[in-house]
Image (cartoon, coloured by chain):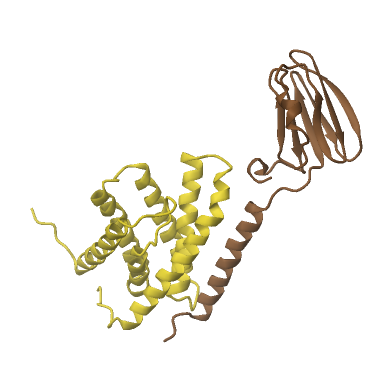
Chain colours: A yellow, B brown
Amino acid sequence: MKVPTTPRDHLIANFAALAIVIHVAEAALPTPLPGVKPGLANVVTILVLMRYGWNTAAWVSLLRVVAGSLFLGTFMSPTFLMSVCGAASSILVLRLAMTVPGLGAVGLSVTAALAHMGGQFALAYILFVPHPAMFRLLPVLMTAALIFGTVSGIIAAAVYQRLPQPISLR
Amino acid sequence: MKFLTFADGIVLALGIGFVVALYAILWTPSGDATAAIIQAPGQTATVELGGEGQLDVDGAIGTSTIAWDERGIRFLSSPCKAKHCVHTGWLTRAGQVVACLPNGITIELRNGGLRYDAIAF
């Protein structure tokens, strides 16, 4: 049985593979707090968003989270739930952020990072630790999101300037 | 090479403002208390702090005496054995709680409504 694939499928698969590699490699880094990580795979999401649109970026993001969790052995675990929630919040907010005129990679990345952390915090508060002390953590988590979002955005902007013409998907 | 557009700068500034606001709202301690809520088995009393006063409260094993003045509020005496409540001393900041467990009486300081004061006083 052969599944017919379009050039767009291949594009999504290639970008998703790139994002998965970054995601898995980054999982080896130690983190001071659960949920604080550089999030470098989002560089790929932002670049795909800027060059190929929201649909493609959403697919890349979703595939990265699912396949990444399969590689890391966290599929269907609470970690996976948090990951999906963060990615979903981030990609949905990006849909809105895209419409802001003149917004570059850094702006998109910062918005996505804050939304990602916000979505994960909301899930953690509602589902895992419904304790007011969680809100003491929130400023620290958001600071990390802001910093790493900016870093990812600068990387994305630097890469974007060096890319050749985007491949036509028609 | 330009990495930051004008809109990026605005988003970044808003982001920084948002994070700073989070610290300001969630990390500041609660401040001085304006009222104390005293709870005993079957009754609750609210005391406006600011003057001086004393109150005898009936609990499960006897009567506790609670006193307050401009320093704060405290258990003056209690019929319990260990007297942890009395030894706790003065409560001064909103969010602080003292309890006489054998007698079933608690005092909690408030400053308006209850925020997350239990972890920021």
Residue under the image location 30 percent in, 59 percent down: A23
Say left or right for B61 vs A148.
right
Q: Position of residue A161 (x, y in %)?
A: 35, 82
Above-or-below relation of B87 to B3? above
Looking at the image, residue A140 sits to the left or right of residue B109; the answer is: left
Quadrant where the N terminus of chain B lies? bottom left
Q: What residue is at 47 percent from the left and 46 percent from the top?
A: A123
User: Which sits in the foreground, A138 or B81?
Assistant: B81
- Residue A148 in percent (x, y) is at 44, 65
**Vertical comparison of A140 with A161: above or below:** above
| The quarter of the displayed image where residue A9 is located | bottom left
Relative depth, front residue between B88 and B51: B88
Please tell me in which quadrant of the rendered image residue B66 appears.
Answer: top right
Q: Quadrant of the C terminus of chain B?
A: top right
Q: Is residue A73 visible?
A: yes
Return the residue found at the far top: B61
Residue depicted at x 25% and y 73%: A169
Residue A76 sits above or below residue A152 on the image:
above
Q: Residue at x 68, y 21 (%)?
A: B101
The percent coordinates of residue A53 (x first, y second) are: 35, 70
Number of marks present in the image shown? 0
Whether residue A96 is visible here, answered yes or no, is: no
Above or below, B109 relative to A9: above
- Residue B32 lies left or right of residue A64; in this view the side is right
Q: Residue furthest left?
A: A1
Indicate the position of residue A67 as horizontal and vertical percent values.
25, 53
